[in-house]
Each structure stands twice: as C-alpha cells, then as structure tokens.
Image (cartoon, rainbow, N blue to C red):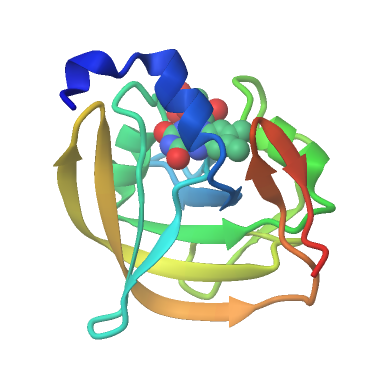
Amino acid sequence: MTTATIDSAQFRQVLGHYPTGVTVITAMDADGQPLALVVGTFTSVSLDPPLVGFLPDRRSSTWPLIQAAGRFAANILGSDQMAECGSLAGKGDKFGGVEWSLSERGLPVLANAIATIECTLDNVLDAGDHVFVLGRVEAMAVRRESDPMLFWRGRYGGFAG
Ligand SMILES: Cc1cc2nc3c(=O)[nH]c(=O)nc-3n(C[C@H](O)[C@H](O)[C@H](O)COP(=O)(O)O)c2cc1C
C-alpha cells in the first residue's frame, strides 16, 4: 500500500479509533505571558535518559514560541477539565478562566492538572506535517487523584475501569 491510497479523511477516521489522553503543553513567552498548546500526542518516550514527547502541527502558531522558550511543562488533564480544555485549545484568551501558577522552575502549571511534567527541550525531529518534540524531564509530580480526560472518535470522556 502506498501513501497515495490514503486520503486525509480516512486517515483521521481510522486513527480516531485510537484513544488518547489530553495534555496541555505550557511555557512562558519572552514577554512573561503564559503559552498553551493542547495535544493528544503526548507520550512517555524513554526512562534513561528520562524523555517525553509530543507532536505539534507545523502550522501551529504557538509551537514556535514554546520552542523559543526552550522549556515547557506537560499538564495532564482530568475528565472534569472540559471547559479549561476548550479555552486553552481556542484562539482567543486561552488562559481566561484557567487557574495557573508559576512552578519553582518558573514554568506556568495548571492548578487543576492531574500531573505536571517539567522539561527542557531536548530535540525536535522531522515528522511529516508535524514535528516530534522530545523533552528531557527535570521535575514531575502527581497533583491530584482523578480519572484522565480521554479523546476518542472526536468525543471527550473519562475512564471507567
Ligand atoms: C483533543 C485535542 C488534541 C489535539 N492534539 C494536537 C496535537 O497533538 N498537536 C497539535 O499541533 N495540535 C493539536 N490540537 C490542536 C491544538 O490544540 C490547537 O487548537 C491548534 O493547533 C491551534 O494551534 P495554535 O494556537 O498553536 O495555532 C489538539 C486539539 C485538541 C482539542
């Protein structure tokens, strides 16, 4: 099978059957304003060295600002954070109504995230119309016990195990 036989609607429809979590990548811009990029592509990559990864779309306007910052936090969302997710994934005032604070390392972290993972930028690899970002973990913590937000077939939900 060649890539020419795969159209984008089919790609989205089939891959949409794979469930993901929802994570917000945050950083500080050069003016001291918080940045946010909602991703479904966050993943654990390596234990030694400790690496995590995610895949920004090359068209993202926020990714170049996060890259310039050189460090970021990954905030794992709980299933009760739909409103925050909608705001942070939008184009307007992303942090309107979103509680956040500065970590000891000076990164913006979401107050209600289930867990936060603070990273320095390790590598940015070519990945088609996306890039694959590797972050080296510098600090990490579970903030509260809650079921995660899940995204599956275009819908949001929680975990019922
Ligand atoms: C559940 C969910 C998962 C997403 N996953 C990604 C992702 O992995 N990579 C990405 O670049 N954008 C992803 N997006 C889209 C971005 O969050 C954002 O809305 C869009 O890219 C606009 O980006 P910009 O503000 O940087 O221009 C996702 C959005 C949602 C709601």
Quarter of the image holding residue 10?
top left
Q: Is residue 108 among what the camera can see?
A: no
Left or right: where 71 falls relative to 3: right
Coordinates of residue 101 in the picture (x, y in percent): 66, 60
Residue in front for this viewpoint, 29 or 144: 144
Instruction: Please give the name of the residue rendered at 19% of the width and 22% of the height, measured from the top-left corner.
Output: 3
Work out which quarter of the rendered image holds the N terminus and state it. top left
Left or right: where 13 falls relative to 43: right
Q: Considering only vertical position in the picture, is 142 above or below 120?
A: below
Residue in front for this viewpoint, 141 or 160: 160
Quarter of the image holding residue 144?
bottom right
Furthest toward the front, the residue is: 1
Furthest toward the bottom, the residue is: 48
Instruction: Please give the name of the residue rendered at 66% of the width and 30% of the height, measured from the top-left corner.
Output: 154
Residue in front for this viewpoint, 141 or 156: 156
Q: Considering only vertical position in the picture, is 12 above or below 30?
A: above
Instruction: Please give the name of the residue rendered at 42% of the width and 61% of the height, measured from the top-left corner.
Output: 43
Coordinates of residue 88 in the picture (x, y in percent): 64, 36
Quarter of the image holding residue 96?
top right
Q: Considering only vertical position in the picture, is 51 above or below 36?
A: below
Left or right: where 70 falls relative to 153: left
Residue in front for this viewpoint, 130 or 93: 130
